[in-house]
Image (tube, grey):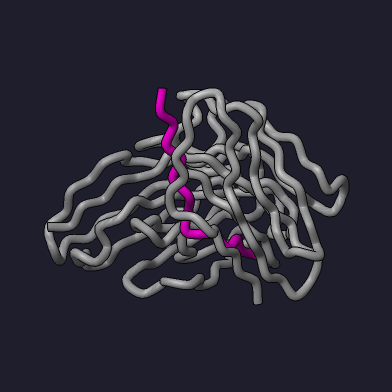
Amino acid sequence: AQSVTQLDSHVSVSEGTPVLLRCNYSSSYSPSLFWYVQHPNKGLQLLLKYTSAATLVKGINGFEAEFKKSETSFHLTKPSAHMSDAAEYFCVVTGFQKLVFGTGTRLLVSP
Amino acid sequence: NAGVTQTPKFQVLKTGQSMTLQCAQDMNHEYMSWYRQDPGMGLRLIHYSVGAGITDQGEVPNGYNVSRSTTEDFPLRLLSAAPSQTSVYFCASSVTSGSGNTIYFGEGSWLTVV
């Protein structure tokens, strides 16, 4: 069975400061992991994905994530937050024929 | 660039009414699925299909029916709407059902059952 845990339901940062959104996963085999972003009343947009190639994955809009097998983590980071980053972020693990979503982390960015 | 198209975007239903959420993709993807999104629960899988003529249940299938008569279309039917089905629904597709394939989502359908 696979599962994913997003450790924070809300994260608040100031514009220009680093962003860290935490995700731990559980998988009985080598997982594929994704981060999606959802802006208010919008669909889900793929930020980045890990599929057993490089452990440091770079995505869109300056985001990146590092796959750490020993820690079963896939945390999302960005060096400097922008107001437009305010959204909900979902960590996702894939298995055969389905995705398993985390419960989401809402990122709040203040001026 | 159509991708995954869902209709309608917004719908209000009365309890007991039936309706169909439409989903179409133009990428020739084999795998299509429906999710519902509820506050604090992420997205939960309702039904999925690995190809035309093949469907299966996900995590929360009760109250919903699906069919897949063509590769492009995967409609979701609510037979007798209940307030518990008030949610945001997302259709998704990918090339295959294999792990690692990027999943593409529609824009969502906001459904309210009163």
Question: Residue A18: x percent and y percent?
Answer: 60, 33
Question: Residue A1: x percent and y percent?
Answer: 65, 77
The residue closer to the viewer here, B10 or B29, is B10
| Span highlighted in magenta in the image | A97-111
- Identity of the residue drawn at 48% across and 53% down: A104
In the picture, measured across the screen, residue B22 lies left or right of residue A45, that is left
- The reply to whether residue B40 is visible in this rendering is yes
In the picture, measured across the screen, residue A52 lies left or right of residue B4, that is right
Find out whether residue A100 is within the magenta segment. yes
Q: In the picture, which quadrant includes the N terminus of chain B?
A: top right
Quadrant housing residue A71: bottom right
In the picture, measured across the screen, residue B108 lies left or right of residue B27, that is left
- Identity of the residue drawn at 54% across and 63% down: B48
Find out whether residue A104 is within the magenta segment. yes
The residue closer to the viewer here, A58 or A107, is A107
- The reply to whether residue A43 is visible in this rendering is no
- Identity of the residue drawn at 78% across and 57% down: A68
**Prevalent SS, magenta region:** strand
The residue closer to the viewer here, B107 or A60, is A60
Q: In the picture, which quadrant includes the C terminus of chain B?
A: bottom left
Q: Residue furthest right?
A: A53
Question: Residue A99: x percent and y percent?
Answer: 60, 60
Against B75, is A27 above or below? Answer: below
Quadrant housing residue A29: bottom right
- Identity of the residue drawn at 55% across and 67% down: B55
Against B6, is B21 above or below? Answer: below
Question: Residue A34: x percent and y percent?
Answer: 66, 49
